[in-house]
Image (spheres, helix red, strand yellow):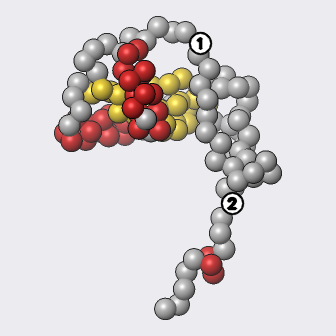
């Protein structure tokens, strides 16, 4: 088990500039918990098991009125994955991180979209 120590976690900004950026939410990341989905191996069957575990954890969080957000980028970068692995009991292979917390009372702003006419054609 990872010691319960406060650590800053940088979050990605999906905005297309200052005006379209999503706000970071209340506080800096107050109240969020991070769940690491990990397996004993790193083969296709382990990946499937990680997907099933992620589904179960996400459904359980939703049933409790919580919001979950997957963070796959931290296990896609070898150095970040190695760092997460070093915090877990060995042998463990981190597959995904779920950020879980209380959803904001209001919906976030819509993300910018391209007009359908510029994407869909008649031909």
Please tell me which of labels 2 and 1 falls first in the chain.
1
Q: Is residue 112 above or below residue 34?
A: below
Q: Report the front residue among 60 and 7.
A: 7
Q: Are marks 2 and 1 in contact (CB under 8 Å)?
A: no
Q: Quick one: which residue is furthest to the front in this view?
A: 79
Q: Is residue 44 left or right of residue 115?
A: left
Given residues 15 and 51, the one toward you in this image is 15
Residue 16 placed where, x, y %?
A: 70, 53
Q: Residue at x 73, y 30 (%)?
A: 26
**How much space separates mark 2 and mark 1, taking CA atoms?**
33 Å
Quadrant for the N terminus in the image: top left
Please identify the residue farthest to the bottom as the structure is shown.
Answer: 123
Question: In the image as oriented, which residue stretches furthest toward the right?
Answer: 19
Query: Is residue 63 visible from the viewing direction of this image?
Result: no
Q: In percent of the image, x 74 and y 40: which residue is there?
A: 23
For mark 1, give the secondary structure. loop
- Is 94 situated above or below 12? above
Asked if residue 48 can be seen in this view, the reply is yes
* Residue situated in front as seen by the camera: 57 or 116: 116
| Res. 112 mark | 2
Disc marking residue 100:
none
Residue 101 lies in quadrant: top right
Residue at 43%, 21% in the rendered image? 83
| Callout 2 crowding tier (Cα within 10 Å): few <14, some 14–19, many ≥20 | few
Res. 6 mark? 1
The image quarter containing residue 57 is: top left
Q: Which x, y percent locates residue 93?
A: 30, 26
x and y, in percent, of residue 39 in the image: 27, 27
Q: Is residue 52 left or right of residue 81?
A: left
């Amino acid at each position: 088990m990872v010691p319960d120590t406060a650590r800053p976690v940088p979050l990605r900004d999906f905005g297309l500039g200052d005006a379209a950026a999503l706000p970071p939410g209340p506080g800096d990341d107050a109240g969020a918990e991070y769940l690491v989905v990990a397996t004993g191996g790193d083969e296709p069957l382990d990946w499937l098991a990680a997907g099933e575990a992620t589904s179960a954890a996400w459904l359980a969080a939703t049933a409790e009125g919580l919001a979950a957000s997957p963070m796959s980028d931290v296990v896609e970068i070898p150095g970040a994955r190695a760092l997460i692995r070093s915090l877990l009991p060995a042998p463990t292979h981190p597959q995904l991180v779920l950020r879980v917390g209380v959803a904001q009372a209001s919906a976030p702003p819509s993300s910018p979209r391209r007009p359908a006419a510029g994407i869909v054609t008649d031909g």
